[in-house]
Amino acid sequence: MNSQCVRTQWHRLFVLLWLCTFAIFAQAQAPDKKSAEDSMAEWIKANYTKFEYRVPMRDGVHLFTSVYVPKDAGEQHTYPILFDRTPYTVAPYGSDQYRNALGPSELFARSKYIFVYQDVRGKFLSEGSFEDMRPYIAEKKSAKDVDESSDTYDSIDWMVKNIHFNNGRVGVWGISYPGFYSGMAAIDAHPALKAVSPQAPIADWFIGDDFHHNGALYLPHMFNFMYTFGQPRPEPTTKWGERLDHETPDGYNFFLNNVEPLSNVDAKYYHNKIAWWDEIIQHPNYDQFWKARSTPQFLKNIKPAMLTVGGWFDAEDLWGALHTYQAANSHSPDGDVKLVMGPWFHGGWARGDGDHLGNVWFAGKQSIFYREKIEFPFFEHHLKGTPDPQLPEAYVFETGTNEWKRYDAWPPKAAKPAAFYLAPGGQLSLAAPASGAEFDEYISDPSKPVPFTTATETGMTREHMTDDQRQASRRTDVLVYQTAPLADDVTIAGPLKPELFVSTSGTDSDFVVKLIDVYPDNFPDNEGNPKDVHLGAYEQLVRGELFRARFRAGYEKPEPFEPNKVTRVAYEMPDINHTFRRGHRIMVQVQSTWFPLVDLNPQKFVPNIYNAKASDFQKATERVYHSPAHPSHINVLLMPN
């Protein structure tokens, strides 16, 4: 064996030994999530006893319910009940099979509560039929008139009477769909319900949450989720529906070539098995079907203390959190209604550290702060009588400065109206345009839509909510407007309200408005720069939202455009609480596609886009006006410096 071969063998051995050493070191240094879960599961089994019940509702249907009671509970040591209702299974099933976590966080399990988990009506092992966002029935005339409010009431009534050693106080919490059930629990609440926390609650599936935003379908979320969740359950089961195999990691091409136009979906994938899809395509406008499922209208005279929680970068249910709080607060003058908004993705406050999302970092473990200083003290006070944590009405995180702010109202009373105007030459200004070019234009081509992310994904990514928008800035079908570098910090707190003057050569169109924080050219990279992402000139998405402009006169009645006629399009985007720092720029982008995050508009008016054919899709020339007569702008609320 020659010397070169020997050196090669020694080199390979050295590398192998180094890799083994590194693996052992990494295993020793990094927490083992599985081991931690197993350890917690063992602790729960040692400290709690699990029971399973079929709880009767007023109409005779029984709901499968798992109950975990502290083993030291007794006549002299009673505990409050913390209740979570879910369509996503209370597994594991079996009185000898234990969860590896209880409650909103480990703090609750250690502090000791009676934890109750329930499969909602028609899901998994519960009886009855499931209905998505089952409408609330204000006037119940018989035992057959049931909704999620009555099911929660009946469940709580049974629990306080039948679960031994409870202290008569109940709290309800849940995230996303369970957040919807939490909100419904607060309506006509049982007297024992003292605290409720709707977290990222679904509130309206047409205007702002999950499947639709301003009437436009959020495509991958609806398509992927309903393929599994929406499959029929003819009888109680412990099994989920099967998952879709996309047969490619490339979501952009998958949806463009296989799913669009949406008239393809049922024949190719759903095969008449997904009832929710059938209902969606039958209700393309905001009719009574959707209105009955909009929860804010029913959040009146709330009696339990309510802590609504949401994330500024929640891609699914940001609208629901903000509007649940607003409705409950405005319609419950004597209520204890509070809002928490942090720098989180969907449910990020309940898991992980909350120190960053994608390439954007938030100067600390904000999820841990929330769990320890806000959520846990809230429930401890209302269910166990510990000292009042003195939470403000609105406890909101200010991105940009990365600081928590305490306000006695949201939006803050100090915030004043202002407007950022689109101006000739790609300028963005607080002053309305006085002269210059009348409009900017681009060609929107449904066959080559603007991608919503550079990631290769078949789903809706969390990270797109803070993604770099430079890839969009460089396209010819995206308009860009920005300020000069800021001389002082600028803080926007509250909703964004675009008011665009536009025209299209077609008869229908979508418009996406994005508010972006442009970092200085010399902005430093994240420490270690692990993904080789340079933050100099980074264009961070702060908020983006699409509006299906056929609904500009109201979601109930779509209207076609008159080709090439200047038309006003105004809508509301979800709130922000963001400071654009000195030296940064404020940017606005306008475009007409955002794919595959949002389904494609044919740009030719058809009564129902779900039934559009391939031949209906066409290119269109879109114009955005910024003249004195047609000053396109975004209305905002500015905080004083």
Image (spheres, rainbow, N blue to C red):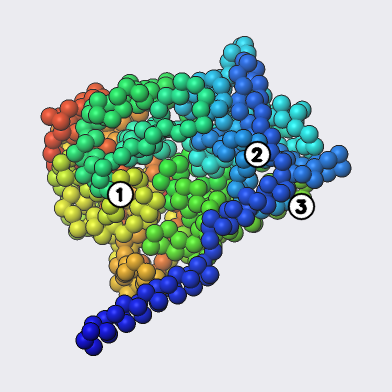
Front residue of this view, candidates 497 and 213: 213
* Residue 170 % position (x, y): 71, 37
Task: Tell me the residue at 51%/31% (across/down).
Answer: 238
Density class for disc 1 (Cα within 10 Å; few <14, some 14-19, many ≥20) is some
Front residue of this view, candidates 568 and 83: 83
Q: Circle 2 sits in a helix, a strand or a loop, which is it? A: loop
Amino acid under label 1? Glu
Q: Circle 1 sits in a helix, a strand or a loop, which is it? A: loop
Density class for disc 3 (Cα within 10 Å; few <14, some 14-19, many ≥20) is few
Task: Tell me the residue at 55%/27% (across/down).
Answer: 125
Which residue is the site of mark 1? 457
State the image quarter where residue 164 is shown. top right
- Give me the disc on residue 96: 2
Amino acid under label 3? Pro
Foreground label between 1 and 3: 1
**Real-space CA distance between mark 1 and mark 3, rounded to the nearest whole angstrom:** 47 Å
Residue 310 visible here = yes
- Give me the disc on residue 387: 3
Amino acid under label 2? Asp
- Quadrant position of the N terminus in the picture: bottom left
Task: Tell me the residue at 76%/28% (across/down).
Answer: 162
Is mark 1 in CB contact (under 8 Å) with mark 2?
A: no
Q: Circle 3 sits in a helix, a strand or a loop, which is it? A: loop
State the image quarter where residue 194 is shown. top right
Density class for disc 2 (Cα within 10 Å; few <14, some 14-19, many ≥20) is few
Q: Which mark sits nearer the N-terminus, 3 or 2? A: 2
